[in-house]
Image (tube, rainbow, N blue to C red):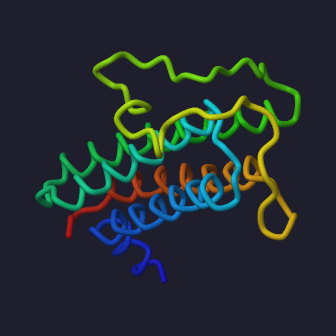
Amino acid sequence: MIEFIHNTLTTRRYWLGLIFIGLFMEGTALYYQYVVGDEPCQICIHIRIWVAAFILLALVACLLPRNKILIIAAHLLNVVAMAGLWERCKYLMDVESGKGDSSCQFFLGFPDWFALDRWFPFIFEVRNLCGATPEMLWGLTTMSEALMVASSMLLLLSLVALGVNVFSRTQS
C-alpha cells in the first residue's frame, strides 16, 4: 500500500488525478449555475479561479520532464494553489455562517490583462451577492461545507505529495 501511494504521488498519475478532480469541481459548479439556477457570487468565482489554477498547473506538470527540481517546484506551486483555494472556501463558509465580512461585489476587480470575467463570462462572471450556498448531497451539506472538506483534503494531499517528492530518491 505504501508503495502504491509513493508511486502515485511521484508520477504523472497524481497530476492526472488533480485534473480529474478539478474538472469535476468546475463541472459541479457549472451544473449548479446552469441547471439548478444558483448563480455564483464573487467568492464562488474566486474559488473557480483557484480550481482552474491547479488544473492548469497539473496540465503543465504532466508535460514537464521528470526533473526533480521542476517537479518539486510544481508541487510547491500546487501547495500555494491549494492554500489559496482553502482560504477562499473558509471565507465562503464564514460568510455563510455569519462570521465573516459579507461585503462582496458584482465584479472581480481584476486588471484588464487578467479580465477572466470578460474573457470567459460563462464560467467567471459574478452574478449574485454572497450569502447562502445551495444544499448538496440530498440536503446533508451545503456547497460551502462540501468545498471546505474538499479543499482541506486537497491541501493535505498536496502537502503529503510535496513531502514524498522532496524525500523521494527517484522521479518516475
In the depicted view, which residue is nearer to us: 35 or 13?
35
Q: Position of residue 39 (x, y in %)?
A: 66, 43
Q: Position of residue 96 (x, y in %)?
A: 82, 36
Instruction: Tell whether 27 sits left or right of 70.
Output: right
Q: Is residue 154 left or right of residue 69?
A: right
Residue 135 lies in quadrant: bottom right
| Residue occupying image coordinates x 41% and y 68% | 17
Which of the pair 99/128 is nearer the observer?
A: 128
Task: Report the label total.
Answer: 0
Q: Position of residue 23 (x, y in %)?
A: 45, 61
Is 92 located above or below residue 61 in the figure?
above
Which residue corresponds to the image point at 65% horizontal and 57% vertical from the top-left? 32
Relative to residue 77, is residue 42 depicted above or below?
Answer: above
Q: Is residue 26 left or right of residue 20?
A: right
Report whether 132 appears left or right of 170.
right
Q: Quadrant of residue 63?
A: bottom left
Residue at the spot 18% in from the left edge and 46% down from the top edge: 69
- The one nearer the camera, 30 or 86, is 30
- Up the image or down, 120 lies above or below 140; here it is above
**Location of residue 73 by image quarter:** top left
Q: Quadrant of the C terminus?
A: bottom left
Q: Residue at x 27, y 57 (%)?
A: 59
Q: Position of residue 47 (x, y in %)?
A: 56, 40
